[in-house]
Structures are given as C-alpha cells and as structure tokens.
Image: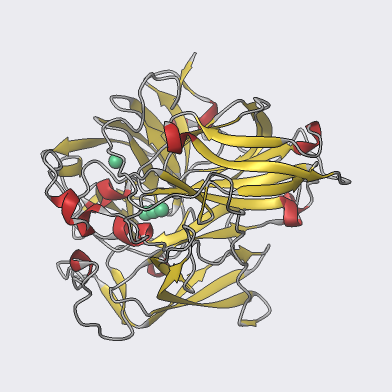
Amino acid sequence: HHNDNTQSGNDPNSGIKTLTSEAPLPAQFSATLPIPKQLQPTRQTSDTDYYDIVQSAATAEILPGLKTPIWGYNGTFPGPTIVQNPGRNVVVTHRNNLPVPTVVHLHGGAIPHDSDGYPTDFVLPAASYGDFPAMPAMGDMPAMTDPQAVVTRQTRDYTYPTPPRAATLWYHDHRMDFTGASVHRGLAGFHLAHDAEEQELPLPQGSRDVPLMIVDRAFAADGSFRYPALDPAMRSTPGVDRDAGNGVMGDVILVNGAPWPAMKVDAARYRFRILNASNARTYQLALDDSTGFTQIGTDQGLLAAPQQLDAIALSPAQRFDVVIDFSRHRVGDRITLTNQLGSDSTGVVMRFEVARTATDTSSVPATLSTVDPIDPSSSVATRTMTFHRAGTDWEINGRVFDPTYSEADVRAGSTEVWTVTSDFHHPFHVHNATMQVVSRDGQDPGPYDRGWKDTVFLNKGEKVRIAIRFSDYKGRYVFHCHNLEHEDMGMMANFTIN
Ligand code: C2O
Ligand code: CU
C-alpha cells in the first residue's frame, strides 16, 4: 500500500482560486507547439561553454491578434534552452535589461553558492527606469535587510559545473518576495544536462526528444497576463487576504508558451521532458487513448528502470521524462494530453496528431541507470520541518523567510532525513541537494516518488520522510515551497552547508 498525490484523496489544487480570462480565447489545438530555441555558445574553451542571455521586456502573440507583454530570457517565453554536454562546464552571463532586480536560479543543479541564485544575490537593472505603471509592486528596490546580500550591476556570470547526472533542469527567476510575479511574466527556460551513460542508451533523440513546459495563465482583455498584485480587481476581492491568496492559477494552459497547442508527430517513439513551470497548479496528466506513459526519468535524471504509468501527477517545479510510442497509432489519429485534475478549459493540455509513418530505431531499455537507494540509517542528522500557515504568512518552523537566519547547519556531502509536515499542499524543494522519499505517513512512497527528486509534493496533513543528500558545495542555500506565491509570502528558509 502507498500514498501519493492522487491516492491521498486530497485535491492538491483545492483552496487555490483560478483567475478567469477576459480576452477571447482561441480554439484548442489551433496553435502549433513551439519548441524553444537552443542557445548557441558565444565562445568555447577546452572544458567550458560560454553563453550570453539578456533579460528583457518584449511582447508575445500568445492569443491570436493580441500582444502579451512578457519578461523573457532573450525576450522569449520560454527562454532559450541551454544544453550542457557531458564533461562541459557552462558559464552564462546574464544581463538585466528589465526594470527590476533579478536573480537566476538553476533549479536542480549542484551549484557553487555564488552561482546558485540566492534570493538576495541581485543583478540590478542595466538602465534606471522611472515608474513602471503596469506593475507598481515590482519596481521596489531589493530588500537590504540581508547583510550578505550581493548586488551586481547589470550583468552577472553564473557558473554551472558539469552536473552529477543527466537531467531535465530548468532556470528561472528567484528574487526574494517577487519570484512568483517574475516567473509568471515569463522568466523560465530549460537547461538540459546530458551525460555519457544517457547518450549510450537507444532512447528517442534529436527532434524526437522534446521539452514541454506546462503553465497556466489568465489573460486580461488586452492580452496581458492577469496577476493579482498587479490587478486592482483582485486586491479588493473579499476573502483574498493577501494579493495572491493561496497561489495564482489561470484558466488557460500553455505548453512552451502556446495555448493548448497541437504537435504533428511521426508514428514513432518520442521522449518528452515534461516540466510543470506553473506558479501554483498541480496537474495529473493522462492520454485520452488511455495507453499511458513509459516514465524514464524524473527531476534529477533517469530512473533505474522504466515504469508504466496511466497518469502522472506533477506538482509545480517537478519534471517527468516519459516516452510515448505513437507507432501504436495510424496516420491521422489524434491523441489528447489531458489534465485529470482540471475542469473545463484546464482539463485539456495539448494534442498530438500522427502525421506520417516513419522508421524508428529507438527503444526503451529495461535498465536505464543506477539509482542507489539512500539507506536512511546513513543519515547523520534528523530534523523536523513544519510547513504551516499563520494568518496571512506562510511559515517553516514558525518563521517567514529571514535571510539572516539559518534553519539548519549541515555537513557537505552528508545525508540527513527530514520529516516534513504541512497543513496545506506544498511542493517541497531543496537547493544544491538531491532527495529520495523514504515514506509517506509511514507507508512506502508511491510511483510518482521514484528516483532522485529535487521537488517532493507534500499532501495536506501528511508526514513525509525524505532522505536528503547535500552537495559538496559549501555556503548558504535555501529550501522552500515551490508554490511561488507561498514562497514569496515567506515559506522559505536558509540552510548552511559547512
Ligand atoms: Cu525552482 Cu528555489 O527554486
Ligand atoms: Cu506551499
């Protein structure tokens, strides 16, 4: 017997309000699935690839005929995909051409402290802006309560050493108190790490290895994204005690930035790297031909062996790498990716249209990788973390985020077992570490918990034991709820690796 997102009987989105679009919405499947561009290095040395990204305001035609103001890495949403090849280091120089300070976090990496995107390690705007009327709450200068805050002007180099495993990582903004609003505007992209072990596998690759970034948004009549703190109507809504309530959800599902898109596929196997980059919404994905998915990977890389799943529960920030075999279908067949936790417009994600027959030499081997189970008795410390709502604050162990306070001092490279409890649904994320779920309410973890995770879903009222292996990089890092509104309202804490 086991518990997981779907079997606990809790709806992980309950208590979170869905904003409604005022703009006319396109017919589902009328958009073509965009594939984010792969970023090309500006220079290369024997062991390092160098990239440049400019963070800038832009517009995107997401709804036909309307221009949506976005903030994007290189002006695009999603941002360009960074590919990190085996044995290569990556250095990304970010220039901030936005009107607010920014912070870049590579989610899921083992990263030296000064490149991790600590929430007060700001890159200040390159230009000085006057009032930015569209977003009054966002022109604030950095909170300078943090004596260790690092402020760089205009550009910052982020150094990403070769990751320990091939994995579907992603990068996104992480500015203290404003992560939700900044990611919602579009500051998110894929970072795909490869390794030699993965490259030797006969998995689908090239144009049949496709990242899918799923988010939900609501649109104002002029096509702009609705976000509560920017939205006078929401601020005065009775019962919404903080601007963002329990989290921000929208009624439109975007995949790679397009509403309910369609993708033409060969009658062949595809690998999809599915990322939930939504601020607050949890999905349960399924295929309407009920053939299900072959899961091959999770947040931190390949599973030991593939597993067959009818549905995938995906909380914010989690990744599932799956293979779908469209050779089961005839040319002309259409298969819809649905969201069993959605209703009406949010119950549909995208559609695959089998366009042609094709040869396919790929396969899914019975052994993918090695995932050594962490032995909880190797843990050098146990701790309890209580995720708790106190009035309008979201707290961990009775505190909202305080950059000067360290909740835990841990040893580099060590393993600890944390027992995490919560009185709401929270995606629990730890920086610079990798995790395995040990138990949920004393039961074995469920199928969605398999493999190395960096984000573990906490069901309301559940007690989850998690083995955490910290990286060797020392310094101050954060762990937090990845419901970005909870994070911005305080549900984040420091730990220090010594
Ligand atoms: Cu994806 Cu600290 O976050
Ligand atoms: Cu939360």
Q: Quadrant of the C terminus?
A: bottom left
Q: Residue at x 58, y 46 (%)?
A: 29
Figure quadrant of residue 49:
bottom right
Q: Nearer the viewer, residue 225 or 200?
A: 225
Q: Is 11 above or below relative to 452?
A: above
Q: Is residue 464 left or right of residue 16?
A: right
Q: Nearer the viewer, residue 89 or 127?
A: 127
Image quarter for ligand 2 equals top left
Q: Is residue 482 left or right of residue 211?
A: left
Q: Is 53 above or below relative to 108?
A: below
Q: Estimate the x, y position of residue 395 in percent, counting from the top left.
A: 19, 43
Q: Is residue 471 left or right of residue 387?
A: right
Q: Nearer the viewer, residue 348 or 410?
A: 348
Residue 110 appears anywhere in the view: no
Q: Estimate the x, y position of residue 455 in percent, counting from the top left.
A: 43, 43
Residue 363 appears anywhere in the view: yes
